[in-house]
Image (cartoon, rainbow, N blue to C red):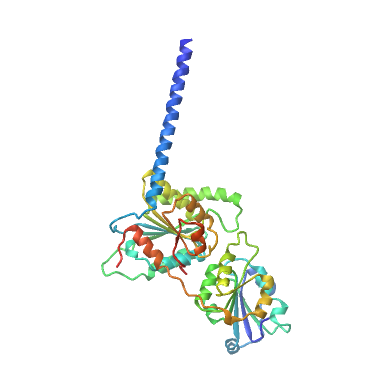
Amino acid sequence: MDNRYSCFFSDMGFLNVAISFIIGISTLIMIRIFYVVYRSSKPLYSRPPGPLSTLIILGSGGHTAEMINLLAVMQMDRFKPRYYIAAATDNMSLQKARVLEDSLPDKAEVELVETSQFMQIYRSREVGQSYVTSVGTTLIALSHALWLMIKIRPQVILCNGPGTCVPLCVIAFVFKVLGIRWSSIFYVESIARVRRLSLSGLLLYKLRMADQLFVQWPQLKSKYPRANYVGRLM
Amino acid sequence: MFKSSCLLIISCSEKVKQKIGEYRMGESHDSVKSKRIVFVTVGTTCFDSLVRAVDTQESTGEDGSLSVDYFTFSSSIAEYLKSASLVISHAGSGSIFETLRLKKPLIVVVNEDLMDNHQSELAEELAERNHLFCVFPQTLYQTISGMDLGSLVAYQPGDATPVANFINRFLGFNDE
């Protein structure tokens, strides 16, 4: 009888330890997440940092045009090496990025022009695809995104709306929480979004995964106060 | 609704092009230049209801004297936009802003078949600001009949510099 009770108590003990362990780890993770969100919302460096590796996520059509417009006014020597990711079914975007990269003036100092790499990523959802099959394609996209992010581990992420950016930003956020890499995520909502955020924008806004979210119309700023209204990019 | 002195250039799907075929009424290269060009584009989408609305008997003139040219895809429509005196477009932001940048009169037709029609938000907002006209395929004809192109206001191009500055400051890069 003693044997049975002692088995019972040691089982309970093990269970207690396991539960306490899980609760403890979860609490630590929650605290870390809150810290990451809090720290991400504030300016990152107090002194000018060196060049930051940058991931630029391109989407089809109007999305890419807006991103090119933004890149054209940014100092490229501060953001290198640069990695461009576009959906696997989107060929035009990478071409446009290549044109932009080729147009950059050569610096006086000799620099290796291996500063940008072009890559492809499988789309989470094609335009017109049903939401049900989107789950499967999203899982594929997630694993591919994970692989790419492990390779790149960018310090800065620029994206402006296509579904391709959600898996990448989620993974970047997880990397932040786990201390693998701190990425500053900048999300610019497309100019086509006047009254409502896109699904990507809404996710990143609500989950507070973007460091800074920019909107191009005042209506969105009033609806989503934590967003930054910066006027129009186009 | 289009005068016979117009050349209608339509960018549309392959299916529609095959169904309708090409109309060329014996024009020489010179006469093409003397015509005013209306450019109709559906961007990279399927928007057959717009092409149908434009290419009716009513719009092309009963004697078929309107010249109509079709192509299915062009990697850059900039040249077509530059030579057009009126552009009729789907509501894609790329088409819209490319046209506005060239300061061409623009009628945006909203595609009701699209799943999540957020595109119409942009067209409606710009129409409210008088930068373009925003219609549905069914109302295209009456809009063109009654429109006053002089009421359109030029769109001032935007500027991405505020975003770049914000990002720079956030990351600690000093400017000026």
Q: Is residue B7 visible?
A: yes
Q: Residue furthest top?
A: A1
Quadrant in which the C terminus of chain B appears: bottom left
Left or right: where does residue B39 sit relative to residue A181?
right
* Nearer to me, A71 or A83: A71
**Vertical arrangement, residue B127 with respect to residue A167, above or below:** below
* Nearer to me, A23 or B94: A23
Tell me residue A182's x, y (percent).
36, 50
What residue sits 72% from the left and 78% below the top?
B57
Left or right: where does residue A23 sit relative to residue B120?
left
What residue sits 44% from the left and 19% below the top?
A10
What residue sits 38% from the left and 62% below the top?
B166
Residue B139: quarter of image: bottom right
Tell me residue B85's x, y (percent).
57, 82
The mark total stands at 0
Q: Is residue B85 visible?
A: no
Residue A186: quarter of image: bottom left
**Vertical arrangement, residue A3 with respect to residue A124, above or below:** above
Tell me residue A195's x, y (percent).
55, 61
**Vertical arrangement, residue A162 with respect to residue B62, above or below:** above
Quadrant in which the N terminus of chain B appears: bottom right
Residue A228: quarter of image: bottom left
Q: Residue furthest left?
A: A109
Tell me residue B97's x, y (percent).
51, 72
